[in-house]
Image: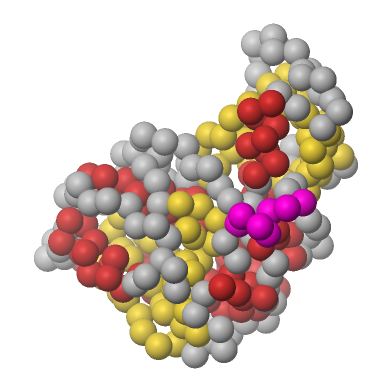
Amino acid sequence: MNPCNRDLDLVAPRAIDFVEYVALDLETTGLVAQRDRVVEIGAVRFLRSGEVIDRFEQLVNPGRPMSPAAQAIHGISDADLAAAPTAREVLPSFLAFLADARTTGLVAHNASFDAGFLGSELRRANYPHPDHRVFDTLALARRRRPDLRIHRLDYLVSALGLDAGPTHRALADAYCVKDLWLGLDGPSTPGNMLVSYPFHDPQETVPRPHGWDELDRAIASGWSVRIEYDGGTRGTGPRSITPRRFEQRGGATYLVAYCHLDLLEKSFRLDRIHSCELLVESEPADRHVDPRAVSR
């Protein structure tokens, strides 16, 4: 399915423009970039052919105890991190690994999470954000494979018959992201089917993702769009909404919009929007929203 912008390939980054790619993954102390910290960075540099040409793997001392819930997921303990360098020490070598934003495309699963966490760590260390944008394999999988019921990394790796499943360790999962990107034909995907995020600090800004430029237009103008949304109690049928703003919660980006069907302001997880159509002739929706707003 096509996302909103009919002319998006004129402005959005195209995967085919890059000589090399870096698939990356993070392990963290939790899900909220504003308060949680990165504890492991894994990344794989590869060519369009799939040939791996370099890799990056580093534990990061978060300067705080590991929560039991996070340790249960990735298995990284306080003892593992005791002798690890801090983010301030690790980030320069990681940024050097990413190389030139003009020739290297970045890839991550649920890319807004990784771009936000890295942006937060860069802000804490007083380093500038690089110019790279991070292509999202989660959004690409929803668009390429809407027939699949689940789009978690482990499920997709299994469904596509890729070699190895994720382990919730950063480097192993980065390899899975690489395989998924190639398995979904990411390098040859038209720009208007891709969603990407800039490095950003969720505490200071909300990401403006490439791949949904029509939503920006609708927010600015008060116009409505018709979307197909995979989630909530209404199923995947078309619905009309008037977009208000983007928000980030728990590592995911949401579109806050007035839903014409329920006459409420709701939150729609951005990667679950399969397609949308700008209703240019529509009148701006009533700005007075029922206070019983709910999230989907």
Residue 151, how many percent across, how many down?
A: 66, 60
Residue drawn at x 57%, y 89% is 49
Residue 246, how many percent across, how many down?
A: 56, 34
Task: Give the quarter of the figure containing the N terminus.
Answer: bottom right
Left or right placement of residue 215 versus residue 154 in this view: right
Residue 85, how many percent across, how many down?
A: 15, 63
Q: Magenta includes 39?
A: no
Q: Specify whether residue 32 is in view.
A: yes
Residue drawn at x 36%, y 42% is 201
Q: State which quadrant residue 282 falls in.
A: top right
Number of numbered callouts drawn: 0
Left or right placement of residue 277 versus residue 81 in this view: right
Q: State which quadrant residue 142 falls in.
A: bottom right
Residue 7, how many percent across, how many down?
A: 73, 53
Q: Specify whether residue 234 is in view.
A: no
Pick whichever, 229 or 78, lies toward us. Answer: 229
Magenta-colored span: 6-12
Can you say whether 66 is above or below 227 in the image? below
Pick whichever, 295 or 76, lies toward us. Answer: 295
Can you say whether 245 is above or below 93 in the image? above
Pick whichever, 271 or 71, lies toward us. Answer: 271
Pick whichever, 165 or 220, lies toward us. Answer: 220
Residue drawn at x 61%, y 55% is 11
Residue drawn at x 40%, y 52% is 199
Residue lying farthest to the left in this orientation: 83
Q: State which quadrant residue 149 falls in.
A: bottom right
Left or right placement of residue 140 versus residue 136 in this view: right
Snapshot colouring: secondary structure
Task: Give the quarter of the figure containing the C terminus.
Answer: top right
